[in-house]
Image: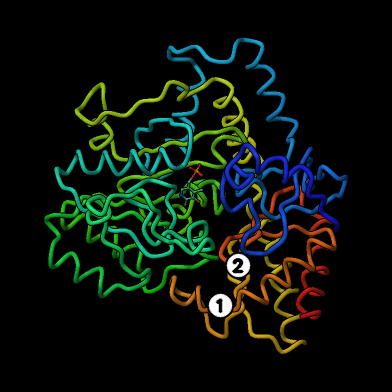
Amino acid sequence: MEISNDLFEQAKKTIPGGVNSPVRAFRSVGGSPFFTKRADGAYLYTSDDQRLIDYVCTWGPAILGHNQPVIKEAISRALEQGTSFGTPNPYEVEMAELICELVPSVEKVRMCNSGTEATMSSIRLARGYTGRDKIIKFAGCYHGHVDSLLVKAGSGALTLGNPDSAGIPDSFARETIVLNYNDSESLKQTFANQGDQIAAVILEPYPANCGLIFPKNNFLQLAVDLCKENGSVSIFDEVMTGFRVSLGGVQEHVNIIPDMTALGKIIGGGLPVGAFGGRKEIMDHLAPLGPVYQAGTLSGNPLAMAAGIAALKMLQSTNPYKDLNCMGRKIKNSILQAAAEKGVALQVPQVGSMFAIFFNENPVENFDHAIRSDVDSFKKVFQYSIKNGVYIAPSAFETCFISTCHAGDPVDISSQVLGDAIKNL
Ligand SMILES: *Cc1c(COP(=O)(O)O)cnc(C)c1O
């Protein structure tokens, strides 16, 4: 497809880089980003009237497809009653009860406005609760643009080539210990050396911000157990995987229960929402009960809660996870088959409605493996696909998402296009 540059050129005059979030700028796949004027079901409609089958799904939230009628209806009903109250509202209670019911680790929950706020507040709470400063994170895991977590943080930073952002004091970064994902030995060693200083271990249970990586050798259980033994807080960042891999996230999928969980994306039904929750005993350290301050003028916003509740209830009643997994498999298999025919070495990690493509001869188990993938082939596949109406994530280090609206034609057509893209390499 042809992309007209006029709007992007105009945007660059008043918005840094023309975008409000860096990955949108298409730096890592070349060319200019398209602008979307409308989205419906599995499709994006660009400002120059192209229709694209969308595998970015607003970077995860749109699991029920774009412009979902039930969610829209819930927002309109809430809208009639006013947009923000600044007092507690009934939606907040319903949302909290729903999250506690669905997410195994969550006994109490606090709403916020983004995934970044959720992880930032989880870290502060873990520090306040333990009275310790150090945190462990893993290379390639992205936890939002929180100062102390923006170290070796995966796609956004990775594709721009500055993994450590300017503007973060060394003294902050020094409190963050970065280890390799799936490296059980170094995790054990770090706890053996300084376990009494570690406030928290934060991780993506399925890292999905440097492609898609899976834990091996019981890595998640080890992290949770080491935290328990050392009085540290285990935090699963399920902003991406929550309500995506299964209703209760990865923790339910693999039955490993952390102390705390950060949520975002799907939980807002397409509006800006985050949440963090966990064991009562920890959560009760938050103000106004406890000494850890955390707040938000628009937190628990009625429109956002109405949208999120509608999305979660719909996922609960329709339970689309098996169907989504079938679609994921179909796409994976057609990519693998095309690669076999063409003789191209690649990996297609896939779970449910998430998949990624690594042009790599070996399975990708950590960040170092991921960045050794062939980015050039990815760019070619991206460009071929978008020319043929299929929009996959515009970076070799992002995950693609499928929605319930992709069933039928969109998945069939995309499987064909992605296979052709590989054969065309
Ligand atoms: C997207 C994401 C975040 C940040 O959420 P925002 O709403 O963009 O602030 C944090 N953690 C993970 C795992 C994410 O995928």
| Mark 2 surroundings: few (<14), some (14-19) or many (≥20) residues within 10 A | many
- Kindly check if marks 1 and 2 are in contact, taking CB atoms under 8 A apart as contact: yes
In the displayed structure image, the side of residue 245 where residue 149 appears, left or right:
left
Q: Is mark 1 within 8 Å of ligand 1?
A: no
Q: Which residue is mark 2?
A: 396
Residue 78 point in image, percent of width and height = 63, 17
In the displayed structure image, the side of residue 323 where residue 167 appears, left or right:
left
- The amino acid at mark 2 is Ala
Residue 296 point in image, percent of width and height = 40, 25
Residue 215 point in image, percent of width and height = 42, 68
- As drawn, the residue found furthest toward the bottom would be 343
Instruction: Please name the residue shown 29% across and 58% down the image.
Output: 224
- The amino acid at mark 1 is Ser
Please identify the quadrant where the C terminus is shown.
Answer: bottom right
Q: Which residue is mark 1?
A: 373
| Between 312 and 232, the one nearer to me in the picture | 232
Closer to the chain start, of discs 1 and 2, is 1
Give the quadrant of residue 194. bottom left
Residue 31 point in image, percent of width and height = 72, 60
Q: Is residue 125 above or below residue 353?
A: above
In the displayed structure image, the side of residue 342 where residue 178 appears, left or right:
left
Q: How far apart are the alpha carbons under marks 1 and 2?
A: 8 Å
SS for dot 1: loop
SS for dot 2: loop
